Amino acid sequence: MAVIRPFRALRPQVDRAESVASVPYDVVNTDEARALAEGNPFSFLHVSRPEIDLPAGTDIHSDVVYRKAVENFEKLIAECPMEEESEPSIYLYRLIMGNHEQIGIVACCSVDEYDNSTIRKHERTRRDKEDDRTRHMLMLKAQTGPVFLTYRRRPDIDDQVSAAVSATPLYDLTAPDGVRHTIWRLSDTGSLVKSFEAVPLLYIADGHHRAASASRARAELRDQSFAHTGKEDYNYFLTVIFPDSQVQILAYNRTVQDLNGLSQEEFLGAVKEQFTISENATPEPPERGNWSMYLDGKWYGLQLSPATTQPAGIVSALDVSILQDRLLDPILGIKDVRTDKRVDFIGGLRGTKELERLVDEGKAAVAFSLFPTTVSELLMVSDANEIMPPKSTWFEPKLRDGLLIHTI
């Protein structure tokens, strides 16, 4: 069963919500965060990326950064102000980007269910990133950004959500990127909590490091407790849960700086040993099992040659795995995309025009456009307790930090 728990959200007043709401901490670097927060003292980036208020070059993992986070958080609570609900609630969070709409349920989920894999994972986490968010969480005594979960949709939950969004929302704002964010507060939570008891599994779509950090923070706080009951707030972590039918994954494309010492002719010859190549291809592959490659101002279409050994296994059969195993590694020498600085990743809305620009300007030698990983593939990999290849999924639109905070 999936446990969801109402919580007493710490949140900004309605007239401050648009100023507070910020992009997730991990989709911007320090310079980008500083630019986004400039002139806005209430931007939550002052809390999630507090180094923006310290001298340039400050080590983002130094003690002074976490102390600044606490200082900025306390200042925001006092001056914004931020207020905590008097009663636990569940919320609905709707995102609209263009013609795409998705509505998630904001609640707290069980750390125990994360630890025992009732909440399934598909990504390895890095220890340094876990260290950062665990310390941030413990210093603030709060989870300030949600983990994005999904589940196999259920009509009974869909019906309850549809009925609830006819009410007047708590927040309704449009972010600078044009995405509309609407939040409703539900005081009657029993029916949704009961319905989720019939959901066998939840899946992390985005936010593996936040979830892992919540688990580590719980372990530390539990060890410090003299009367641990399992009901404390630190036993739960902040989530937004969307049905799988609404989740949108965009392509996560690749560029490579050079051809690994090959001429263009030699490179194309090597590719032809694994793939069937067509010219004048579309920049975006039409379906799974197709790749588009931009080289010397031209788009080529790639399909795995029938003469080659077909991949076996859930992960190895993914388009991103085939590109890595059959082309990036053996031909271009990219052994590990996580550490090789010759490869770069262009995700989400930046699209194929950005791939063309990078190659045309000489910043990359070749670019690859992939068909997006599907939600069903993500669920299959998670159910098999396997790990998705790095940079496989780009979820869009993004949730905003700072609107609903879970104190621990």
Image (tube, rainbow, N blue to C red):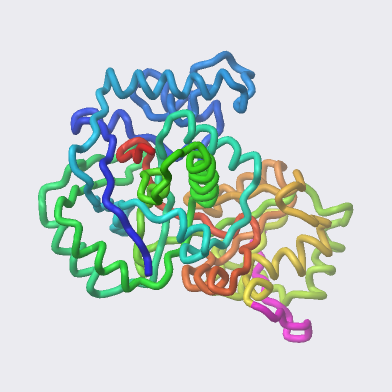
Q: Is residue 101 visible?
A: no
Q: Residue 19 vs residue 163: left or right?
A: right
> Would residue 300 be counted in the magenta stretch?
yes
Residue that protrudes farthest toward the bottom in the picture: 307
- Residue 271 at x, y = what percent? 79, 69
Q: Residue at x 43, y 18 (%)?
A: 71
Q: Residue at x 37, y 41 (%)?
A: 400
User: In which quadrant will I find the C terminus?
Assistant: top left
Answer with the quarter of the image where residue 357 lies.
top right
User: In this orientation, which residue lies closer to the viewer: 104 or 116?
Assistant: 116
User: In this orientation, which residue lies closer to the viewer: 139 or 398?
Assistant: 139
Answer with the quarter of the image where residue 81 lies.
top left
Against 141, is 351 above or below? below
Q: Residue 389 vs residue 247: left or right?
A: right
- Residue 303 at x, y = what percent? 67, 76
User: In this orientation, which residue lies closer to the viewer: 312 or 11?
Assistant: 11
**How many numbered discs sit on the rendered protein?**
0
Against 50, is 286 above or below? below
- Residue 368 at x, y = what percent? 65, 59
- Residue 172 at x, y = what percent? 21, 42
Against 2, is 58 above or below? above
> Would residue 174 be counted in the magenta stretch?
no
Q: Is residue 247 visible?
A: yes
User: In which quadrant will I find the N terminus?
Assistant: bottom left
Residue that protrudes farthest toward the left in the picture: 167
Numbered range of the magenta stretch: 298-313
Q: Residue 289 vs residue 235: left or right?
A: right
Against 18, is 304 above or below? below
Residue that protrudes farthest toward the top in the picture: 55
User: In this orientation, which residue lies closer to the viewer: 203 or 140?
Assistant: 140
